[in-house]
Amino acid sequence: MKPKTPVAMRELIAQIRQAIPFDMPEAQLCEGCSKGCSMKLLEYLEMEIENWEYRLEQGDIPNFGDLKRLAKSSKKIYKVLQVNGLV
């Protein structure tokens, strides 16, 4: 049985927080960036995650499109971090 979308969103957020180094020092983030600004991408993703955490606390129910969008943007940002040698 598949989890309900709020549970799936919380699980996705936990996976993102585990995989992406949000606490990396700014100096390290900006060192040798070859594709995209890692710091700005992390700020964007953190803002999206915090927005969803707030919305979930308020009882908002995400749909499958919301899950797909957050997963897709997270994967793209992760790939840029890989190219930049940060993960």
Image: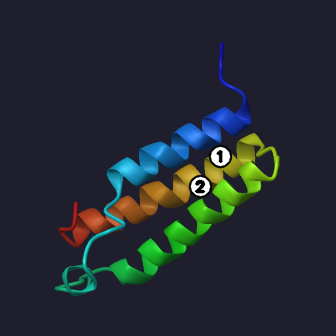
Q: Residue furthest front?
A: 57
Name the residue tied to disc 2. Answer: 70
Give the mark count: 2
Q: Is residue 19 left or right of residue 33?
A: right
- Look at label 2 and name its amino acid: Leu
In the figure, 47 relative to 16: above or below? below
- Look at label 1 and name its amino acid: Leu
Q: Residues within 10 Å of mark 1 (few under 14, many from 20)?
A: some
Q: Residue at x 25, y 63 (%)?
A: 82
Name the residue tied to disc 1. Answer: 67
Question: From mark 1 to mark 2, how far is it between C-alphas?
Answer: 5 Å
Residue 36 shows up from this direction: no
In the figure, 11 relative to 44: above or below? above
Quadrant containing the N terminus in the rendered view: top right
In the figure, 79 relative to 62: above or below? below
Please tell me the numbered disc located at residue 8: none
Q: Is residue 56 left or right of residue 33?
A: right
Q: Position of residue 24 (x, y in %)?
A: 27, 71
Q: Is residue 60 left or right of residue 82?
A: right
Q: Position of residue 85 (x, y in %)?
A: 17, 68
